[in-house]
Amino acid sequence: MNSNLQQVNGVYFFIMLITSALAILLIRYTVTLRRYLKEFTRVSKKVSNKEFHTRFNTYVKGELGELSKNFNYMIQIMDSTIEEVEYKHLQLTSIVKSISHGILAIDIKGNILLINDIAKEMLKCDLKTNVEGSNFKFIVKDKKILEIFHKYVGSTQNEVIELDLRDNLVYRIKIDPVYLQDSKHAIIGSIINIEDITDLVKLENMRRDFVANVSHELKTPLTSITGFVETLKINDEIDKATRNHFLDIIEKESNRLKGLIEDILMLSSIENGQDLSYEQVKLFDIFKEVCEITQYIASSKNIEVSYDFEDEEVHILGIRDNIKQIFLNLVDNGIKYTPENGRIQVIQYYDKDKQNIILEFKDNGIGIPKEYLNRIFERFYRVDKARSRDIGGTGLGLAITKHMVKSLGGNIEVNSILGVGSDFIVTIPQNTE
């Protein structure tokens, strides 16, 4: 009996021992698992906050250890991948920002994926506003540009359109499709390049006008010369007076042709910067030389040429012949367009800060209509073409003058009232060296 009781007690003790061991192991595993889950929660929160430098610090064996190792590797891969993506995005953004044209990337739904500041300026957007993610139809204000975007964004064709906009602006808009990688059919958006070609168009128009004007200006005297030469050749019975009259016309037209060619060559020389013989030039001496040259024609019209120099010793650094040509063109221009018994005054003074030398060429001539004032410095532009040709103008004098003044770092402007007179104002920076 006692023996059976002892056996039962032994079994109970063994069971209790096993149970206790299992409980201890379970508690230990639970504590380890809880610590592991706590560490997992900590790491996952940091990863969610983009703290990709964080790692598991709990070292366990078995499947949990393998999971920790894999999770740390995954974080490392995510960190390096995101760094690479951010670096490439920074490169792309820097490249787009440095492009001198407006650049936009738009998806197939019309949402703006990428845009640089120049494009924002051209589309009249606020530079401080982030428009990426917005649809272009809410961003583009100009109706013409909006119509182009609606028509061609998402197109499979490459499109180039030139638009004449308000404020005399001309934009060239190039729209290219963006395909899904390794696909020639799946369009995922468009790349838009907007270029301001206003200046290019103006230059092209100027070039076209210049060629047309040169051809016309050369053709007129050549036609006249050819006609009178032919007349003299086929008519042996022309009296001496008529012959001399024809020869005078030929001489006049030849001189006009020569003057035109010389002006064109001079203008080309100035624009190309071929003459670099700079020196200190005394302006009052230049004025006196010009007075001597123009004295005869001024006297023939009884025009008084006077002066008022604040500083007769003032010098500027420049090309002597060019400075002389500025004075000659403006004084001669005043004489040509001032009626008999008129007056011309040349005034020199400094601005308030004595940083610039001011030259004014005033006359009481026929004046210039207000609507023509902004064009008189254009090549071959004449307010009164017939009158200009009659008095021997080539149409290049004021254009040459403007370029010469610009070569000195200055600028020229004109104030004029029709029937009252004109005032050409030349501003030249004072050279203190």
Image (tube, grey):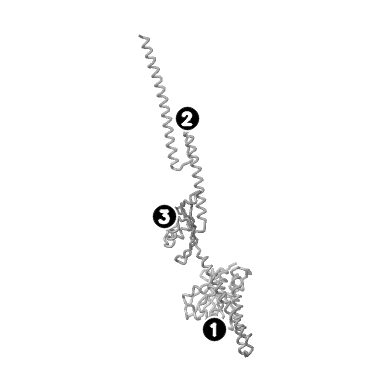
Q: Quadrant of the N terminus?
A: top left
Measured as percent of width and height from the top left, residue 279 is found at 62, 70
Mark 2 Cα shell of 10 Å, populated few (<14), some (14-19), many (≥20): few
Q: Amino acid at mark 2?
A: Gly
- Residue for badge 3: 135
Secondary structure under badge 3?
A: loop
Circle nearer the viewer, 1 or 3: 3
Q: Which mark is residue 303?
A: 1
Residue most toward the top?
1
Measured as percent of width and height from the top left, residue 302 is found at 55, 85
Measured as percent of width and height from the top left, residue 168 is found at 47, 67
- Residue for badge 2: 62
Residue 135 sits in which quadrant? bottom left
Q: Nearer the viewer, residue 353 or 221?
A: 221
Q: Are marks 1 and 3 in contact (CB under 8 Å)?
A: no
Q: Amino acid at mark 3?
A: Asn
Which mark is first along the chain, 3 or 2?
2
Mark 1 Cα shell of 10 Å, populated few (<14), some (14-19), many (≥20): many
